[in-house]
Image: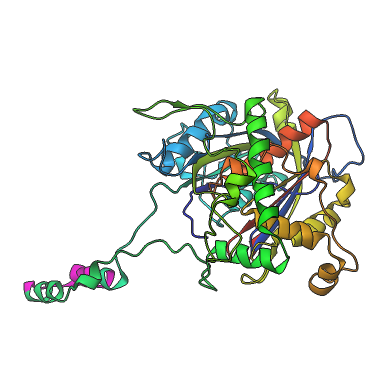
C-alpha cells in the first residue's frame, strides 16, 4: 500500500523474547518483549550483551483522515509525539544518543543529536525500533524512534508528460524554445497523477489481496464482520477504562483539544452486513467496516540500555529481546507475514506459543487476520509452504488484541509499529504476563 511517512529509528531487538512483535505484510518482523518484573518462566538475557529496554511510548490520538487534523502537516503530529513525555525523559546532555526523525528539531531536541528517516511502508517504525542494536553495539545509550502518517494531505503529482515538459522548460535557453514547449501542452497533460495505492510488483491494491486471501482460506464475510465488531468493542472498552494510556492530548491550532481516537465505532452485525464489498465487486467479502481505515497519527518510543535507564532513575516498561524479518510472494502471500515470522522469532528465543502471554497482531483487514489464524492452525499449510512438519499453532483469542487493533484504533502506516509495541508492554504489566509477541505485515511481501 502506498504511504508517505517520516520515521524515527531506534536500535533494538524487537519481537520475541521480552515482548514479541511480528508484523504482517509481505514483510515480517518478529520481536519479543517481556515486562520488567520478578516473575520468570525463563530468562532471555544473553551473557555479555546489554539489555535493551523500552522506557516509554506515546502517540497522538489516531484520527480518521480528513477530520480534526486535516489542516496540519505530518511534522506537526510527529513533533507533538516527540515533544511530550519522550522529550522530557530523553537524556539530552548525553552525547551517546540517536534520534530517528527530522521532526526532532521542532520537538526541541539538540541539533547535536544525529537523526535520520527510514521507511518500509506499514512497518516503518518497527524497522526504526530494531535499530536499537546500536545500543548493544555500544554506539549509543539511548534511541528515540517513531513514525507518522498523514493521509489527509497526500502528494498528488502532475502527469509524467507534464513533468517532462516542465523539466524541459527549465532547461530551455531561448524564448522560442520555451514557447514551443508551452505550445506542446495538451489537456491530457493536466490530468493529475494520484498516489498509487497498489503493489508495485502486481499493480494490485492491498484490499484486493486481502479479498483473495480470505477466499483462499475460506474466510466468510460473517467471520470478518464478527472480528471487526470484536476489535471495535474491545477498543471501546479499553478507551472507556483508561487503558490506552499511551495516547497524549494534542491541541490542534484553532480547534479543540484532541484526547481520544475517533475511529472506534462499535456497531451491530446487522449494520455491518448492509455494507457492500469495497474492492472485488459484487462478490467480495472485504468492506470498509472490516478493513483498517485511512488514518492520521504519530507515535514515538524511547529505548535505552537497562544500565542507562536505571542510572537515570527510570523504571523500564519492558525488555526488547529479538526480532525477525520475513518476506513472501507479494501476490498470493502478501499478508501472511505473521504466519511465517512467528515461529522463526519463537525459535530464535527458545520459546513456544504457550510461553506467550500477550499477542498483538496488526489488523490490516479482518480477512487478513482470520486467514493468518487459519494458516497457523494448518498442518497442510506448514508442510506445503513453510517446510515445517507441524503447524505453527493459533494464538488463543483470550490473549489476542484485547484492547482493540488497527481495525478500530486506526492505522497510520508509519506509526502503528510503536503503538503495537507500547500496547504489548502495557498489557503485560496490566495482565501480569512475561512474554509478548507483535506481528505486522507491510507492502512488498515484507513482514516484521
- Vertically, is 329 above or below 253? below
Horizontal placement of 15 versus 121: left or right? right
Image spot of residue 91 (x, y percent): 59, 30
Above or below residue 194? Residue 402 is: above
344 or 151: nearer the eye?
Answer: 151
Q: Is residue 173 magenta?
A: yes
Between 263 and 26, the one nearer to me in the picture: 263
Q: Quadrant of residue 237?
A: top right
Q: Is residue 126 left or right of residue 175?
A: right
Residue shown at the point (40%, 43%) measured from the top left: 66
Could you tell me residue 86's position as x and y percent? Answer: 57, 31
Q: Specify whether residue 202 is painted magenta.
A: no
Q: Is residue 341 visible?
A: no
Q: Position of residue 257 (x, y in %)?
A: 44, 25
Figure quadrant of the C terminus: bottom right
Which of the two residues, 309 or 168, is positioned nearer the viewer here? 168
Q: Residue at x 50, y 30 (%)?
A: 83
Q: Quadrant of residue 331?
A: bottom right
The span shown in magenta is 163-175
- Inspect this view and state whether residue 31 appears: yes
Amino acid at each position: 500500500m502506498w504511504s508517505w511517512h517520516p520515521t524515527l529509528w531506534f536500535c533494538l531487538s524487537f519481537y520475541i523474547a521480552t515482548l514479541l512483535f511480528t508484523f504482517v505484510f509481505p514483510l515480517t518482523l518478529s520481536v519479543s518483549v517481556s515486562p520488567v518484573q520478578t516473575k520468570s518462566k525463563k530468562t532471555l538475557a544473553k551473557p555479555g550483551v546489554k539489555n535493551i529496554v523500552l522506557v516509554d511510548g506515546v502517540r497522538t490520538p489516531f484520527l480518521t483522515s480528513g477530520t480534526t487534523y486535516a489542516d496540519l502537516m505530518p511534522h506537526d503530529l510527529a513533533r507533538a509525539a516527540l515533544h511530550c513525555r519522550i522529550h522530557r525523559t530523553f537524556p539530552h546532555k548525553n552525547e551517546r544518543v540517536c534520534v530517528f526523525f527530522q521532526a526532532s528539531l521542532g520537538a526541541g531536541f539538540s541539533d547535536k543529536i544525529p537523526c535520520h528517516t527510514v521507511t518500509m511502508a506499514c512497518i516503518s517504525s518497527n524497522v526504526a525500533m530494531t535499530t536499537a542494536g546500536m545500543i548493544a553495539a555500544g554506539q549509543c545509550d539511548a534511541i528515540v524512534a517513531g513514525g507518522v502518517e498523514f493521509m489527509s494531505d497526500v502528494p498528488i503529482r502532475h502527469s509524467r508528460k507534464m513533468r517532462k515538459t516542465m523539466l524541459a522548460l527549465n532547461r530551455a535557453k531561448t524564448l522560442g524554445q520555451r514557447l514551443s514547449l508551452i505550445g506542446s501542452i495538451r489537456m491530457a497533460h493536466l490530468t493529475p497523477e494520484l498516489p498509487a495505492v497498489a503493489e508495485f510488483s502486481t499493480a494490485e491494491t492491498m484490499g484486493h489481496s486481502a479479498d483473495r486471501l480470505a477466499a483462499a482460506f475460506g474466510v466468510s464475510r460473517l467471520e470478518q464482520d464478527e472480528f471487526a465488531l470484536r476489535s471495535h468493542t474491545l477498543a471501546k472498552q479499553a478507551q472507556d477504562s483508561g487503558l490506552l494510556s499511551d495516547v497524549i492530548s494534542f491541541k490542534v491550532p484553532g480547534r479543540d483539544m484532541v484526547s481520544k481516537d475517533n475511529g472506534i465505532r462499535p456497531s451491530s452485525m446487522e449494520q455491518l452486513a448492509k455494507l457492500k464489498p469495497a474492492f472485488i465487486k459484487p462478490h467480495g467479502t472485504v468492506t470498509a467496516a472490516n478493513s483498517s481505515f485511512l488514518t492520521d497519527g504519530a507515535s514515538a518510543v524511547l529505548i535505552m540500555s537497562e544500565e542507562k535507564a536505571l542510572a537515570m532513575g527510570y523504571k523500564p516498561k519492558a525488555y526488547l529481546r529479538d526480532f525477525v524479518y520475513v518476506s513472501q510472494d507479494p501476490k498470493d502471500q502478501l499478508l501472511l507475514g505473521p504466519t511465517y515470522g512467528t515461529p522463526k522469532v519463537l525459535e530464535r528465543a527458545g520459546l513456544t506459543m504457550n510461553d506467550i502471554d500477550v499477542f498483538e497482531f496488526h489488523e490490516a483487514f479482518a480477512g487478513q487476520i482470520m486467514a493468518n489464524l487459519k494458516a497457523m492452525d494448518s498442518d497442510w499449510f506448514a508442510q506445503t509452504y513453510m517446510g515445517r512438519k507441524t503447524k505453527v499453532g493459533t494464538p488463543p483469542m483470550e490473549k489476542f488484541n484485547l484492547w482493540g487493533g488497527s481495525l478500530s484504533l486506526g492505522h497510520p502506516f508509519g506509526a502503528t509499529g510503536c503503538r503495537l509495541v507500547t500496547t504489548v508492554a502495557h498489557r503485560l504489566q496490566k495482565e501480569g504476563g512475561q512474554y509478548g509477541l507483535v506481528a505486522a505485515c507491510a507492502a512488498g511481501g515484507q513482514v516484521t
